[in-house]
Image (spheres, helix red, strand yellow):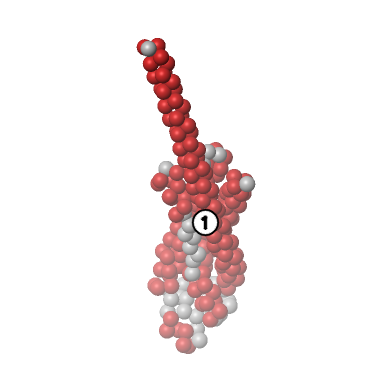
C-alpha cells in the first residue's frame, strides 16, 4: 500500500513538473512573440524618424549651397570700387537666416529610457543605432558654432555697424565694409563645416536605414 502511494505521489509530482514546464514554455513563447512585435514596431518607427531626418538634412544642404554661392558673390564686392546696392543688402540678410536641425529622436529616447534597447539582439544593428545618434551630436555641435557666429558677429554688425537711414537715399547701409567682408569670409568657412557635418548626418541616416531594412527582412 505504501509502495503504491509512493508511486502515485511520484507520478503526481512528475505531472505537476511537466505542467509547470509547459506553462512556462508557453508563457516564454508568448513573451517572445510580444517582444518581437515590439521590436519590429520600434524599428519601423525608428526608420520613419531617420527618413524624416534625412529629408530635413537634404533640404539643409540645398540651403547651405545657396548661402555658399551668396558668400562667394558678396566677398568680391565688399571694400571694392563697386557701390553698394539693394541686392547686396538682401544677400546679407539672406545669410543671417540659418538652418536648424532638430532630429526626431522620440523613438530612440524611448528605446534607451525604457531599457527596451535590449530587445535588439543584433549587435551590428544596435551599434549602428547608437553610432547614428552619436553622429547627430557632432552635427549639432557644428550647427551651434555656426549659429553663434551668425548671432555674435553678423547679427552684432547689422545692429551696430549699419545705418539704415541711408536706404531711402538709395545708398547701402553698411558702414565698415572691411569688417563685414571679414565676417562673411569667416562665415564661408563655417558654411563649409556645416555642409560637411550635414553630409555626415545624411550618410549616417543611409547606413542606419540599410541596417534596419536588413533586420526587418
Q: Is residue 95 above or below residue 30?
A: below
Quadrant holding the N terminus:
top left
Residue 49 location, x and y as percent?
A: 52, 56
Residue nearest the viewer, comparing 45 with 30: 30
Q: Residue at x 47, y 32 (%)?
A: 22
- Can residue 182 be seen here? The reply is no
Q: Position of residue 200 (x, y in %)?
A: 57, 52
- For the question of whether residue 165 can be seen, the reply is yes
Most distant residue in the left direction: 2
Q: Which of 161 and 116 is in front in this view?
A: 116
Residue lying furthest bottom: 169
Q: Which residue does the numbered mark 1 point to in the structure image?
A: 49
Q: What element carries label 1?
A: helix
Q: Going 42% across and 43% down the picture, which residue do you hit? A: 115
When asked about the image quadrant of residue 158, the answer is bottom left
Total residue callouts? 1
Q: Which residue is drawn at 51% across and 69% down?
A: 95
Q: Position of residue 124 (x, y in %)?
A: 57, 40
Q: As rendered, which of 93 and 173 lies closer to the eye? A: 93
Task: Judge whether 173 appears above or below 136 on screen.
Answer: below
Where does the image place residue 44, in percent across and percent down from the top left?
Answer: 54, 52
Q: Residue at x 50, y 80 (%)?
A: 172
**For residue 58, side relative to residue 28 (left or right):** right
The vertical placement of 171 against 206, above or below, is below
Amino acid at each position: 500500500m505504501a509502495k503504491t502511494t509512493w508511486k502515485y505521489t511520484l507520478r503526481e509530482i512528475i505531472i505537476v513538473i511537466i505542467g509547470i514546464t509547459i506553462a512556462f514554455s508557453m508563457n516564454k513563447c508568448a513573451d517572445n512573440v510580444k517582444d518581437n512585435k515590439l521590436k519590429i514596431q520600434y524599428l519601423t518607427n525608428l526608420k520613419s524618424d531617420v527618413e524624416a531626418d534625412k529629408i530635413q538634412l537634404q533640404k539643409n544642404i540645398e540651403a547651405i549651397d545657396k548661402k555658399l554661392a551668396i558668400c562667394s558673390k558678396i566677398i568680391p564686392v565688399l571694400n571694392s570700387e563697386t557701390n553698394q546696392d539693394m541686392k547686396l543688402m538682401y544677400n546679407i540678410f539672406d545669410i543671417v537666416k540659418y538652418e536648424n536641425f532638430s532630429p526626431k529622436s522620440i523613438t530612440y529616447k524611448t528605446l534607451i529610457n525604457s531599457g527596451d534597447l535590449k530587445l535588439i539582439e543584433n549587435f551590428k544593428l544596435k551599434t549602428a543605432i547608437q553610432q547614428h545618434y552619436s553622429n547627430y551630436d557632432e552635427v549639432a555641435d557644428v550647427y551651434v558654432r555656426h549659429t553663434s557666429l551668425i548671432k555674435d558677429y553678423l547679427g552684432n554688425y547689422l545692429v551696430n555697424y549699419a545705418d539704415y537711414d541711408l536706404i531711402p537715399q538709395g545708398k547701402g547701409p553698411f558702414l565698415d565694409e572691411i569688417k563685414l567682408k571679414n565676417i562673411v569670409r569667416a562665415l564661408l568657412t563655417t558654411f563649409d563645416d556645416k555642409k560637411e557635418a550635414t553630409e555626415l548626418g545624411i550618410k549616417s541616416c543611409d547606413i542606419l536605414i540599410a541596417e534596419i531594412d536588413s533586420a526587418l527582412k
